[in-house]
Image (cartoon, helix red, strand yellow):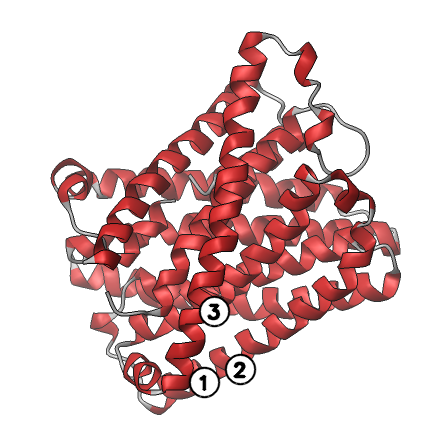
Amino acid sequence: MGSQVLGAFVFGLYLPSPALAVINYASVILAAAVYVLIFSKFYRAARA
Amino acid sequence: MKFTPFNFQAPLAAGGVTLMAFNWLNFAVPHGEGPVAFVDIQWTGLSVSQASVYGPLVAIMLVLAIANLALMGVFTRDLARWLTGGEGYREFMSGPPSRVTGIMVPIAATAMTIAILFAVVPFFFAPTAERIQEFVVPGVAAFVGLLAAALVLEFRLLRGWLGTPPDTGGLNFVWLLDAFAFGLVSLAGTGLASAAGTPVTATVAASGSLIALVVGSALLAWKLIVLTYVQLKSRALPELQLQPAFFLVVPIACLYGISYFRATQYLHRWYEIDLALPARILVVSSYAAAVGWALVTVYLLGRYFRSYFRTSQYFPTQWAMV
């Protein structure tokens, strides 16, 4: 998902393709979901 | 769970996702000069579909920016106790090379927080955006301090490795965390250089960024060669817990791609050196490399995702997936 940051630059500066916008958007949502998942594991481990 | 510097990956990842949402809005929402702000989104005139696109991103930005700042506060307090205690630090630094490199994670997380403060805070608070120049000088001072800390820690790591060359068989991609940290420091520096309104502050930030970029690029090249050799020689993937560390190359490619791109912008703005074509090649090729590496890693980690990750316990390398 980290590649999205550069993907947003490519979209904004050189390739304003709707497909790239959708991929970049989906990457943000997926990254947020994975963050919640890993943070919940981290939180449980920290409390144990 | 005992405190380790790897804990800083939690605020670091929160900051990363925050910047992802900010960048999407910055390039997708029409706005005037400067970065996009909350007031640039005409909320009352949005269709339902537009609101359902922008709304989640703004919510993600807000929640994870708060998480970044709160977790940085908590872990900075823990880090101070850990360092003053002495014992934990000595024990950590006597570990294997890949683990010891984790001492750079607090540096990376602090650089990410600087980037958040200069991107997300002005997004939500318009008065801050108008007065951004007042914050550039303190920001550059913090950046210089961070760069100095990164260099001191790196020299300490290199001195240890040169004194006792590491067992290459025990190395894994976690060893790239220092190159990652220098990438984030340069990202913060080049961001400040592009925001700076005076040539002096812009030059200080750009010069510091150049140092971070050169040191980080050299480390990255050296370590990638060693790790590729180690991986090819071992003929097997590392143990499951360590496998997500392969993903670390993706954000590193992005950080260096954006930092070099911003360096070309600095040269264009202050010295009228036109590097539009090299900048374009750099950004697009870095993106291609990052996406290519991510796809190969997803393929390599098929078994990890199918039968391990969902039920696994927390392990610090998992943050590399964000």
Q: Which x, y percent locates residue B70?
A: 48, 54
The image quadrant that residue B35 belongs to is top right
Q: Residue at x 52, y 54 (%)?
A: B69
Task: Tell me which chain the residue with mark 2 is part of.
Answer: B
Looking at the rendered image, the disc whose residue lies closer to the viewer, 2 or 3, is 2
Three-letter code, disc 1: Arg
In this orientation, which residue lies closer to the viewer: B165 or A25? A25
Q: Which x, y percent locates residue B62?
A: 54, 38
Task: Tell me which chain the residue with mark 1 is part of.
Answer: B
Question: Pointer 2: residues within 10 angstroms few (<14), some, or many (20+)?
Answer: few
**Residue denoted by label 1:** B156
Give the residue at the far left of this rendering.
Answer: B307
* Residue at disc 1, secondary structure: helix
**Residue denoted by label 3:** B219
Mark earlier in primary sequence (3, 1) = 1
Residue B152 is marked as 2
In this orientation, which residue lies closer to the viewer: B304 or B275? B304
Name the quarter where the N terminus of chain B is drawn: bottom left
Examine the rendering and report whether any part of residue B104 can be seen: yes
Task: Tell me which chain the residue with mark 3 is part of.
Answer: B
Three-letter code, disc 2: Val
Examine the rendering and report whether any part of residue B225 can be seen: no
Three-letter code, disc 3: Leu
Q: Residue at x 26, y 77 (%)?
A: B96
Name the quarter where the C terminus of chain B is drawn: top left
Q: CA distance from mark 3 to mark 1?
A: 14 Å
Q: Which x, y percent locates residue B41?
A: 69, 23
* Residue at disc 3, secondary structure: helix
Q: CA distance from mark 1 to mark 2?
A: 6 Å
